Image (spheres, helix red, strand yellow):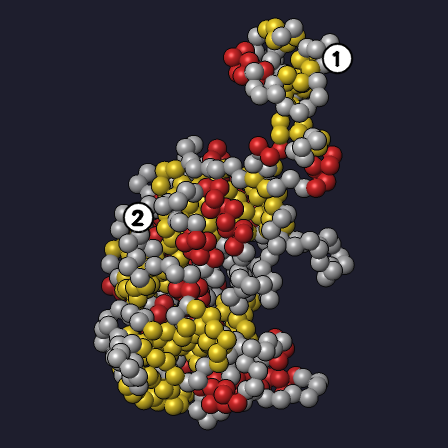
Amino acid sequence: MPIKYVPFIPEPIEGQAVLGNFNRILRYQGADEVSMTIQRGMPLYEVEKQETVGDNKDGNMVIRGECVSACAYLKEQGVKIDLVYIDPPFASGADYAKQVYIRRNPKVAEVIAQAEQELDIEDLKSFEEKMYGDIWDKEKYLSWMYENLMAIKSVMSETACIYVHLDYHVGHYVKILLDEIFGEDNFRNEITWVRTASHNDSTQNYSRVKDSIFFYSKSENYQFNIQYKPYTEEYIASEWTKAPSGRYYKFENMLDPQNKMAAYDFHGTVARWRTSPDKFEELWNAPQTEVPNSHGRIRLGKDGKPIKRCRIVFMDELPGVPINDNWDDIAYVAGRAAESVNYSTQKPESLLERILKSSSNPGMVVADFFGGSGVTAAVANKLGRRFIHCDIGLNSIQTARDRLKADGAEFDVLEIKDGVQLFRNPVQTMDKIKSLIPGLRNEDSLDSFWEGAITDSHLGTVPVYVPNLMDSSTKLLDTVLINRIIHQAIPDLDASIKKVIVYYIDITSEEEICKFIAADDSTTVQIELRDLKSVLDDVVIGDEAEFHTEEVSEGMFPEFRVTIDRFISDRVLGKIMEYNNKCLLNTKKAFTPLQISEEGLEVIEFLSLDCTAADGEWHSDSEIKIDKKGFVIRNGQKTKNFWDGTIHSDKKPLRLKIRNICGDETICEV
C-alpha cells in the first residue's frame, strides 16, 4: 500500500466549469471519481534502485512504474521537469505485440561458414507476444488521462512545456482536457505529423497518415527556440536569384506592414519604413554587393533612389525556413531502419530531436512518462539534456536500458514497489486468471464489469470482480472504486445476488475500505475483499540455468569465463508450444514447428555479470546481448561474432543475470 499521498498541485484546479461542461456533453460518468482522486493525491510507494549505470552525476532515471506514482516520487524528491513529451495509448482498440525472435544455437555457431552473411527477416524463427492492449472505454480513458496530466503538471517547472502525441481516436477530447489543465491561453500549437506519404489500404475514406501533437506551456514564460529546415530546390528556383559569384539573393519589403511608423525621407524616398533611420543607414553603408543597381545592401530604382522592396538578403546568411506546425519531412521508423529496436510503437529520433531542440536547452530535464522504446531519453542524452524515462512495461524498461547503455548514457534504473512487479506480462496473467481462481466461470447474465461468477451452495451465484492488469486505473482499490461498486455495479445485479467478491492488487487500507462499506447502508449485498497477490504468486515461475565458472587467465591479468550449459524457461516453451499449435490448426500451407534444442540456449537474449556486489542493486560489470540474428553486442558495442554460450569478465563474478527472449530476468549466484 502507499506510504502516503502527495498533493497533485497546491492550488485549486483551474477552469472546473469547462470540465463540467465537457462531462455533460459526453455524459461523462467518471467526473466525480476523478475529483475524489485529485483531492486524495498521488500515491507514493517505496522505490527500489535496481541498477546504476555509470557515475550518473546528472541524476538520470529509468523508472518502471505508472505515471502518477512516478510523479509522486519525483515531487517528493523535489525534481522539476523542463520539458515533457508523452506518447500515451491512443485508445485505438488495437493490440500491440512484440516480435520475439529465437536466437541461434551457440553450440553450432562455430560451424556456420559465413558469419557476416545477413539473413532476410523471413529466415528468422519468431513468434509474437502481446505487449499490451490499447482497448479503453472512452470515459475511463479520459479519467485516466486527466489524472495523469494533473500529475505531470505537478512536477513541471514554471517555464516548462509539454507535447502530447495522439491521433484521431481521442485527440480532440484530450485537447479539451489540456485546455482545462494548462489553460486555453497556454495552448501553443497543434502540430500535425504526417508520418507517411500514403496508404493503399482504404477504399471507404481518405487514408489516415497523420498524428496530432498538442503543444502547451505551463505559463506565459517558457523555453522556445525556433527551428529551421533547408530551402527546397523548388523554392530556391522560384524566389532567389543567383549572383555571378554563385551566391543566391532576394529583395525584402522594408515598408511598415501596420503603418504605425512615422514616415521619413531615406535617400530621396519618403515612406513609412519598418526600421529606424539609424539601422537603415547601416544597410546603406554596408560593403558593396555584386547585385546590380544597389548601394550597400539597398536596391535602387531607375531613378537611383531606394524602392519599397529594397533590402538585399543573401540566402547563405539565413538559417533556413522556420518550421511551422505541419511536419511532413520526418518519416516513421521502418522495420529495417538502422534505429529500429523492435518496438511496435517506436517513434523516430528526428521527431524527438526537433521537439527537444525547440523547447529545451542543454542541461535541462526532459521526461517521458510513457517512454516506450526509450527514444526521448536516447535523444535527450545525445543532445546533452538530463532525462527521465518512465513506463509500466518491463519490455520498455529493458529496451530503453539497453539502448541507453549502448549510447554510453549514465542513469539509475528504479522500480516503484506498487505491486506491478508481481507480474511480468499482464496480458498472459489476465488470460490465466480465470483458471487460477477456484470455481470461477463465465456468466453471460453479468455485466462486463464482473470477470465472472462462482457458485456457492448456500448463496447461489456470487459475482467476482478482478482488476484489469492492463488498465492501471483499476489496480488500486480505494474508496473511489468501492463507491463505484456499491452505487453502480451492485444495483445492476439481479435481486437474488447476496454476495460479491472483489479482488485487488493494491489497497489504500483494508480497514478504511471495510469501514466505508459498513457505513454505506444503500445495499444489503455482502462484499468480500480478496488479495489477488496470492493468485498471482503462482503465475510468476522463474527460469532455471545450469552453468559453470572457470578462470582462463592467459598472461598477467586474470579472466573469468561463465559457460551456460543449459537454460530452461517454461514460460517461453509454453509460448512456443501455443504458437505451434495455433499455426498447425490455422495454416493452409506446410508448417515447420519451432523447436528448441535440449540445451535451450536459443531462448537467451541477454546476460550480465555483477562482479561488485553479491546482493542489492545490480552492477553490470560485463554484459552481452544477442541480437535477433545471433550476433553479439558486447558491453554496448556491436560485433559480427556469433554467441558461443559464454560471458567473460576481468573480475571474479558474484552474480549472473539472464534475460530470456520474452523479457523475463533470472538472477543466479555464481
Identified at 33% across, 68% down, the residue is 419
In this rendering, the label closer to the viewer, 2 or 1 = 1
Q: Amino acid at mark 1?
A: Lys
Identified at 52% across, 46% down, the residue is 354
Circle 1 SS class: loop
Please say if the residues under marks 2 and 1 sit with CB atoms less than 8 Å apart.
no
* Residue furthest bottom in the image: 598
Circle 2 SS class: loop
Place of residue 83 in the rendered image (x, y in percent of width and height, measured from the top left):
42, 45
Looking at the rendered image, the quarter that the N terminus falls into is bottom left
Question: In the visual, does 293 lie left or right of 383?
Answer: right
- Which residue is nearer to you in this view: 441 or 574? 574
* Residue furthest right in the image: 203
- Which residue is nearer to you in this view: 125 or 138? 125
Label 1 sits on residue: 302
Label 2 sits on residue: 79
